Image (cartoon, grey):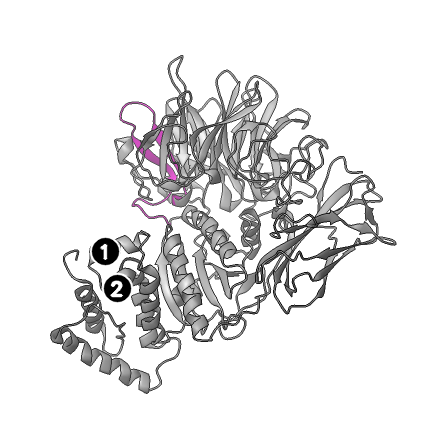
Amino acid sequence: MRGLSSSHVFLLLVISAAVLGKGTVAFLPVPGIKSSRERALIRPLRASLNQESSSGKNDVGSSRDEFLRGFLAAATGAMTGAIATGREPRAAEAVSAGDVDPERPQTVQTYLEDIDNYNLKCPDFPKNLEWVNTGPLSFQKELRGKVVLLDFWTYCCINCMHTLPVLARLEKKYAGEPFTVIGVHSAKFENEKDTRNIKEAIARYQIQHPVVNDRDMQMFSAVGVSSWPSLVLVGPRGNLLSIWPGEGNGEKVDAFIQGALAFYDGKGQLDKAPLKVSRASGSRGGLPGSPLSYPGKLHVDPALPRLFVSDSGNNRVLVLDRKTGALLAAIGSATGEPGLEDGDFESSRFTNPQGLCLSVDGRVLYVCDTDAHALRAIDLEKKVVSTLAGNGEQGFDYTGGKGRREQYLSSPWDVVLKPAAAGTSTLLVAMAGTHQIWEVDALSGLARCYSGTGREAETNAGNRLDAAWAQPSGLAVGGQALYVADSESSTVRELSLEGSGKSRTLVGGALGTSLFAFGDKDGKGAQARLQHPLAVSVVRGDSQVVVADSYNHKLKLVDPTQGTVKTLVGSGRPGLRDGKQKQGELWEPGGLASDPTNPNLLWVADTNNHAVRVFDLVSNELTTFALDKDVPTAEAGASGKEAGRGRPSERSILNRRRSRVVDLGPVAKQGRVQLQVDVPEGLQFTATRTSEWQLVGAGAAADTRGIINKESGAKGMAIVTIPSTVEDGAMVELESAVYFCEEEKGVCRTDGVVFRLQVKNGGPSRIVASHVVERASSKPRVGAA
């Protein structure tokens, strides 16, 4: 259809729909339709539409609306530019690809004027759905007068993960505007339908906007989206404006949000009162008092008693003594601050580190810095972190061939050493973002694709480059075979490291290329079922493989020779319990590491339990590894230094991942916020650490940070004045970090709340921010008493 004009393309879409059924046709005006012949073709279709509209068939669920929703889903992505501008398809493709076009604001306005005339209603949220970060919302009530961006996602999906930073940037850009993002979680896997698990994903990914659990895909189907992720823009009357399937649409979505806010502001249809959102505390379960946060992967040193742990949620790597649980080193931000920064152990930064592996000589630890889209190298002797490949930006390169920061990577998730001749060192990387396996020279940083076309599928081939993977997330080497936890195909697969690199599926999946053959069933080959496995490890002399069947909350044993799998431990329900077989419980385990010094032991990163577990392959018993009290939380800092020392004033004074968020609404410029702190009975303020507050987003004014004064009993108070330099309409955040101890246990903790405020001329001159310390959700802090 490249040779057709935009108007011809549009006519084909309309006429095709007309063939499917009379009365189901709606159309959008296109400037490109000019000839009398074209108008003659459209006229009866318009008459049919008008007849239906006049008969009152204008509600949600009408054939007219169903068609328009389907049309938007099919046409918006590639045809938005053509519909809005009447350009030739080649230009429309350039617009849909996100190319900057000086005419875009005008063409978006033209499009909005056209689509607004049809008042296509977005189906409202069913009343039986569960919400997180807010109470139930409706387009006809709470969301009326708002421009709303719906993000249809499922938390397993790497493309959905890539979209989250885009949403965060849009939320920040349009803070204070009548705009909100709502996550519509429409689960792929059975495990993802559980609101408890969704809450953990929200905490792990630091999602602050409202999320609704669309567990039976009611909204997904009603709106008419067909893929994860999909973004849907809705106007202030609950009217559908545009649909974008897939990732990579940030620039286009931004242009439409900006255009929609201007367009509906001009029509006087916006409600500028802030939407109240209250985010619950980050961790809702798992090991009480654990200093870890969603640990993703781990690695065992074969020569020394060292255990390396990716403390993913705290954006750091820990080195532990696996005999005593003592802390040997903490690498990365002491406060959990993300980033991509090289340097010493304290100044370096990671962002959601995952896979780990050690060099043959034990001097260098390689790290998949997943959300920084980089591969890092930690020199354990020099205590220096460097970047081997990647630069912090997500890449769409499926070939590679460059090194260091010139090479773009996409969500590297796991890494292993490739068996090689003496004197060479090559790393194999599970490149989850491009559904491939890459190889990286550990000396030069040269990175290139090793296996996979980049198409997301379960496809085996005689040549490694012709195979297709589906979000590979775990790797293990046994002899001359690479074992892969191919998470989205729910399989364990094998790739030969010899010859042309033949691949095969050991267990799980389907005989075809389906990505929806999952479940929980022991057995052989394609008759067995797994659910989103994230890790594999070779055991018993490389003859067998253990897989972390993550969404079934189990460990299972795979026999590569027989092509069979059987459950070792796990009840199939999320939980934290030591024991054998079904008595032992895990919660979405994400990492495995065999122990070369004790082949009977397997180390487990029990991700949602914030714990390290140990499984004995002889006794079949699962136990919890006890970390020594010297392992700090991210708040306390790896070196025992005060958390705020040496940091810019705009950096957080608390671990925001574990803090509650409360929307306080408007406050006047130079208004006063009375911060009131209440500590429950049996607790007291820490004697050696002062509780404090910080105003974030107010610029570099001198009065944006202070202490919380202890009042009588277990109460504290501070008066915070909004600086006069803050612009009208700006959003600011008041961070409250309270340090307290349990009198009986002698355990000290920290509790954080982030209060959101919008500075508005004419707003209240005095408001109260109430911080009631929560005993259960707080995390222990070492050395505070």
The location of residue 783, given as percent across then percent down, is 76, 35
The location of residue 687, given as percent across then percent down, is 83, 41
| Circle 1: residue type | Ala
- In the rendered image, the residue lying farthest to the bottom is 55
Identify the residue at horizontal 36%, vertical 26% (top origin).
446
Would you name the residue on which mark 1 appears? 91
The magenta span reads 489-516
Q: Quadrant of residue 266?
A: bottom left
Sequence-first tag of 2 and 1: 2
Question: On the picture, is 246 further left or further right than 161?
Answer: left
The location of residue 272, given as percent across then percent down, is 54, 69
| Circle 2: residue type | Thr
Closer-to-camera residue (545/200): 200
Question: On the picture, is 784 further left or further right than 183?
Answer: right
Assign the N terminus to one quadrant of the image. Answer: bottom left
SS category of the residue bearing label 1: helix
Would you name the residue on which mark 2 appears? 85
